[in-house]
Amino acid sequence: MDEEAKHESGSPARIGATTDLPHDRTTVARFREAFPRARWSDRLNAWFVPGRTAEKRISRWLAEVEAEADRFADEKGRDAFAFDPIESRYLEATPATLQIQTPYSRTVVNEVREIPYARWDADRRLWTVPYRSFDELRKRWPTIEAAAGRSEPEARQARREAIKGTQEDDASKARIRERRRKRYPVPADDAPPFERAVGTHVGIVFFMGTDGELADPATVSAFYFPTAYGEEYVWASWRSGSLEELVTTWPARTSPNERELKRGWWMPTLEELRIARRVAKSRQRARERRDKKDASGERPAGSA
């Protein structure tokens, strides 16, 4: 914001704006060249630029410097990639960005999200990473590539074949069947609020109600969370939340405490909501793509 600043000698107030700069000579020299009337103020501990439009001019100059720095960082990353490229079927180098396309893997998603400036391209179903982030990508690539390989259909099928008929296979199938029932155990004397976002051991859900059916403690412990001694649980039905519902949910200020974790439900944190919102957004986009495809699809066979 434009401000009035007194000159060091005590002269009348002057209209202008101040800015702090990195303490390297090159940046300061470029700043002095762009703003020849700028003066250093010991009292303000900043550079003072006079004029009513000083703030706008400083902001524009800083934006140009930042954009130039980004271009330089991209060029540096592009050179680093050219000198020692990552060769992988999951990575494609284009003149503008590095593109990552893998089978779905939660590990891949978590790793890529830690890379600065990485972006998800929903239309092309791939991640884009600018060359300026190449060093971070290289550091995380072994984990990304290994997780992608494990998520290939052939690898998944091989794992299923390897455990076929074993106790692990039976347990996996039982867990899937249980999740499809869209039910969750809640304490009979401490039920969660209905029709609002609630954190649970299976993610954020919206409870719809309960008919009072008692939950078997063995089932609760096997598929949900360890039951508390002497606690009685009932089954509550639940649904996933829409993106709009999750976006408008106010997060809890603190993470769930030990009592809430043992109870099985709590008010969701911001990080939990962010994960749920990303899932809901992906689900919404997939639904929109299906609707668009259906609207422009071929006519049924035999139609006029």
Image: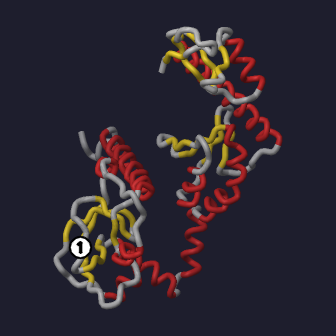
Q: Residue at x 30, y 59 (%)?
A: 197
Asked if one can make out residue 151 in the rendered structure from this viewpoint, the answer is yes
Residue furthest out toward the right:
83
Mark 1, secondary structure of its residue: loop
Residue furthest out toward the front:
10
Q: Residue at x 59, y 51 (%)?
A: 114
Q: Amino acid at mark 1?
A: Ala
As drawn, 134 above or below 104: above
Front residue of 127/16: it is 16
Q: Residue at x 57, y 63 (%)?
A: 151
As drawn, 165 above or below 59: below
Front residue of 229/181: it is 229
Quarter location, residue 141: bottom right
Asked if one can make out residue 67 in the rendered structure from this viewpoint, the answer is no
Say which quadrant the C terminus sits in: top left
Residue 61 rendering spot, x and y as whole percentages? 61, 18
Q: Is residue 291 left or right of residue 160?
A: left
Q: Is residue 74 left or right of residue 1?
A: right
Q: Which residue is mark 1?
A: 191
As drawn, 96 above or below 106: above
Q: Residue at x 54, y 75 (%)?
A: 160
Q: Is residue 240 left or right of residue 8?
A: left
Front residue of 109/268: it is 268
Q: Using a 10 Å C-alpha cutoff, classify the residue at mark 1 as few (fewer than 14 neighbours), some (14 to 19) or many (20 or more).
A: some
